[in-house]
Amino acid sequence: MKKIGYLGPKGTFTEMAVNAIFASKQAIPYSTIPNCMDAVSAKEVDIAVVPLENAIEGSVNLTLDYIIHKHEIPIVGEVVVPIEQHLLVHPENSANWSGVEVVYSHPHAIAQCHDFLRKVLPKAELKYMNSTGAAAQHVLNHPSEKAAAIANELAASVYQLDTAERCIHDYENNLTRFVILSNDKEEISSPLYFEDKTTMMVTLPADYSGALHQVLSAFAWRKLNLTKIESRPMKTGLGNYLFVIDVDQRMDEVLIPGVIAELEALGCGVRVLGSYPCFTLKKTKDVDKKPVPK
């Protein structure tokens, strides 16, 4: 049986992504994103699932930097999970939750609930954890502390916490992308299939006028739709950046190879981080699902 490593402990949104795609596999939680990615690199697990981007707070830079700089682990799939943040408290403190003195959660989760915390718990101290699941686990293990966790329904169930307030996130359309990483040529399939994507990393040959325009033109004249372009530091000096680009289709035999050849002819460095299927747990009427690939 394949082993799936994910950002734990139990009760995280990452576990929700794993359960949606790999329900019958052995799932192993890791305390941090680097530990999870190290595990798949060392072949302790076959697949790693880690958060990459949130619709409200943007990219998870730690994940992106590890994919680019630390481990050349291909992206073999993506899962989009709707995010609903709840305020969870120990059952012993449920009746007096308004007296919470400290709130624990992942930095992104706390940032997603800024308005609620400012208006309802303005005096509460905010403490960051490695994950929302770790925050819920901490609240369970410290019943004497006037504390709350920002986490999801799964965490509330796993750690038997009470939900003091539901859906405390600032924006309704709160989604997180989780990437599936594997050194093996995994063919991921699920009825939750939505679309295909190719993610590339591009470095420019030099800092000269029009360099980025030339890069984008290689996609534009081939009518390749880009769903995201993001700059990240190359970590070689101030002002040195690379670009991470998402293309709205799988690797083909003509168009994307043509882009790569053109960019390399311009002196750019190109690395394909993955070409993969995308799955979504979001239920919406205004999105037409594409047929599941055979």
Image (cartoon, rainbow, N blue to C red):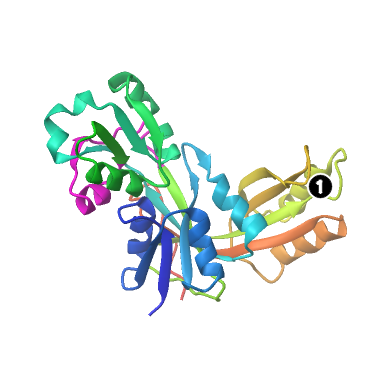
Q: Residue at x 50, y 66 (%)?
A: 39
Image location of residue 87, percent across then percent down:
26, 36
Nearest the camera: 180 or 247? 180
Q: Does the magenta-highlighted stretch encompass residue 282?
A: no
Image location of residue 116, percent across then percent down:
32, 26
- Residues shaded magenta: 151-174
Q: Quadrant of residue 147?
A: top left
183 to 120, vertically: above or below: below
Q: Quadrant of residue 14?
A: bottom left
Image location of residue 166, percent across then percent down:
23, 36
Q: Which residue is mark 1?
A: 214
Image location of residue 28, percent across then percent down:
38, 66
Quadrant showing the N terminus: bottom left
Q: Residue at x 44, y 47 (%)?
A: 176
User: Would you say 115 lies left or right of 235 here?
Assistant: left
Q: Of helix, strand and loop, which one carries label 1?
A: helix
Q: Residue at x 48, y 61 (%)?
A: 36
88 to 99, vertically: above or below: below
Q: Quadrant of residue 103?
A: top left
> Is residue 206 in sight in this rendering?
yes
User: Would you say 163 lies left or right of 227 here?
Assistant: left
User: Would you say 41 lies left or right of 163 here?
Assistant: right
Q: Residue at x 41, y 73 (%)?
A: 3
Name the kind of residue labelled 1 in the image. Gln
Crowd around label 1: few <14 · some 14–19 · many ≥20 (10 Å):
some
> Is residue 284 in sight in this rendering?
no
Nearest the camera: 293 or 104? 104
User: Would you say 33 lies left or right of 204 here?
Assistant: left
